[in-house]
Image (cartoon, rainbow, N blue to C red):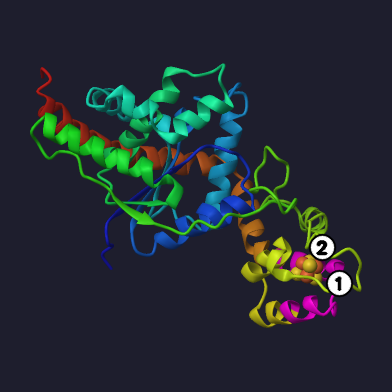
Amino acid sequence: MSKKGRVFSGARPTGRQHLGNYLGAMKNYVALQDEYDCVYCIVDVHALTTVETTRDLRNNTYDMALDWLAAGIRPEESIVFVQSHVPQVMELHTYLSMVTPLGKLTDLPTFKEKVRENPDNVNYGLVGYPVLMTADIVLYQTDIVPVGVDQAPHLEFARETVRSFNYRFGANVLKEPQMKTTEIPKVLGIDGQQKMGKSLNNHIELAATPEETRQRVMQMVTDPQRMRRTDPGNPDVCNVFTMHKVFSPPEEVAMIDTECRRAGIGCVDCKKRFAENLNKHLEPFRQKRAEIGQNPDTVWDVLHDGARRARTIAEETMTAVREAIQLPR
Ligand code: SF4
């Protein structure tokens, strides 16, 4: 069956993935493969803009790719690769930077946020981040980019940059990517307060053992108003219930919804049930991860093969780009 077009998405190498990564991106990556030709990139160069040390970069890249494959990304169909393995992206980034007004970059809310977070490390790469991101997307003649609502301005930036480039060089060599707005759920951490993330240590790793997973689940914060077992709870404000809705069978979700409100079920029991359902859900992932992980070369082979396929598309684009710019042959 022919597919609807090419999807591109990139993610920083953050190592072993957690439930937030799974629900926020990986699940969607896997599903998109049925309808689109997918290009999934581990953007290691982007990571350099904010990391202090590159010590873990290789391991994080490996672990992330391993998790992607274990979750169901099919490398025989999709292109999975590492950004720095396709040097053409740096070249395109440079050309695109020539049609990008500096003020537009420094006005972007994400740039301002990064400056606030890290005022002592406002490097050139950080300013040019959206230009490199645009190069990532358009190098592969991408049709569709799945984005959450908060990333929409970045894609709009990419589209405008493509238009500027095509206009400036009088040729339609770069394809304007379309946005596929995806509802990206905000997955809270076990603290029930903040977005799940490694830096906050409020995450549940997909590759954790069943026992580790159970322990993390048992630490989850529930309805803060429910102090005693005999108090009725409110599942609508409870992160455990939110997770039940994703991983537990509907009858069980309905039962908890009712019983929690009349103190018919306690939080300990409720969390045990969630841990069990989550572990059941993650079992095939863990098995596949262990299988692939037996031979680490498998993961690197996938990434190298992906880069080879990506470079072929990239070189075609760059040939047209150099021609449009009229660079000396
Ligand atoms: S019983 Fe379950 S849904 Fe209700 S507050 Fe406790 S953990 Fe949350």
Vertical order, 315 against 191 (above or below): above
Vertical order, 15 against 77 (above or below): above
- Please give the residue where the numbered disc 2 appears in the rendered image: 225
Residue type (three-letter) at the residue carrying disc 2: Gln
Percent across and percent down for residue 174 are 19, 39
* Residue name at image x 78 percent, y 61 percent: 222
* Residue name at image x 45 percent, y 47 percent: 150
Residue 303 visible at all: yes
- Please give the residue where the numbered disc 1 appears in the rendered image: 266
Residue type (three-letter) at the residue carrying disc 1: Gly
* Residue name at image x 31 percent, y 34 percent: 135
In the visual, does 103 lie left or right of 277? left
Q: Which residues are magenta?
A: 256-278
Using the numbered discs, state the Cα–Cα distance from disc 1 to disc 2 in whole angstroms.
Answer: 13 Å
Vertical order, 224 against 310 (above or below): below
> In which quadrant is the N terminus drawn?
bottom left
Q: Does the beta carbon at disc 1 come under 8 Å from ligand 1?
A: yes
Residue 316 visible at all: no
Confirm whether the magenta stretch covers residue 257: yes
